[in-house]
Image (tube, rainbow, N blue to C red):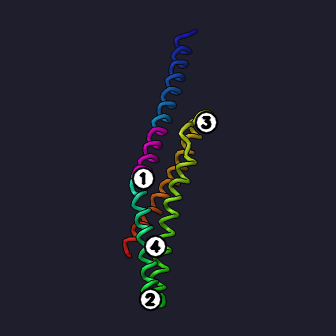
Amino acid sequence: MSLFHKMSVLVFVIGILVSCNGHQKQVEDLKGEVLGIHDEVMPLMGKIKEEEKRLMTASGKLMTEDSAANKATSDKMRATAKKLENAYEGMFVWMRQYKLDFEGMSQEQVIAYLEDQKEKVTKVNEEITKALEEAKAY
């Protein structure tokens, strides 16, 4: 085999290795981003339940005091409590469907999967944050 052919094969092999390492770094970065978003809101899960309970209790109290005068506010509080419940459930739905094992998937499929998961967990994060922010109004 000529020197030219040996060099061509070496360049080809190095190119493949560099490409694989680049994809692996992208995968690791995406995994870190997805889990970082998850970790940002996971500590709020207890707060969600506290706020939901607080709103339902306060709503009931308002209705007991004067149901006619407080109905609109009570309904808004209950709607916000429902948003909190949905956000809470959304986190667990996302966590149950999130794959930790990418066996049998190509690097491109893993990257596409993780980008999709990043969008999903970002949406969950936004729903939790928005619902908690809305609850502060009461």
Which of the two discs, 3 and 2, labels the residue nearer the N terminus?
A: 2
Which of the two discs, 1 and 2, labels the residue nearer the N terminus?
A: 1
Q: Which residue is mark 3?
A: 105
Is residue 30 positioned above or below 87 on the image?
above
Q: Which residue is mark 4?
A: 56
Name which residue type carries label 4.
Met
Q: Which of these two is toward me, 42 or 28?
A: 42
Residue occupying the point 45% across, 78% down: 59
Which of the two discs, 1 and 3, labels the residue nearer the N terminus?
A: 1
State yes or no: discs 4 and 2 in contact (Cβ < 8 Å). no
**Is the C terminus in the top left, top right, bottom left or bottom right quadrant?**
bottom left
* Camera-side mark, 1 or 3: 1
**Is the N terminus in the top left, top right, bottom left or bottom right quadrant?**
top right
Residue occupying the point 47% across, 39% down: 26
| Region in magenta | 26-39
Is residue 10 positioned above or below 99 on the image?
above
Q: In whole angstroms, how far apart are the C-alphas of marks 1 and 2?
A: 37 Å
Which of the two discs, 3 and 4, labels the residue nearer the N terminus?
A: 4
Q: Magenta span has 109?
A: no
State yes or no: discs 1 and 2 in contact (Cβ < 8 Å). no
Q: Which residue is mark 1?
A: 42
SS under mark 1: helix
Q: In whole angstroms, how far apart are the C-alphas of marks 1 and 4?
A: 22 Å
Q: Which residue is mark 2?
A: 66
* Mark 2 neighbour class, 10 Å CA radius: few under 14, some 14 to 19, many 20 or more: few
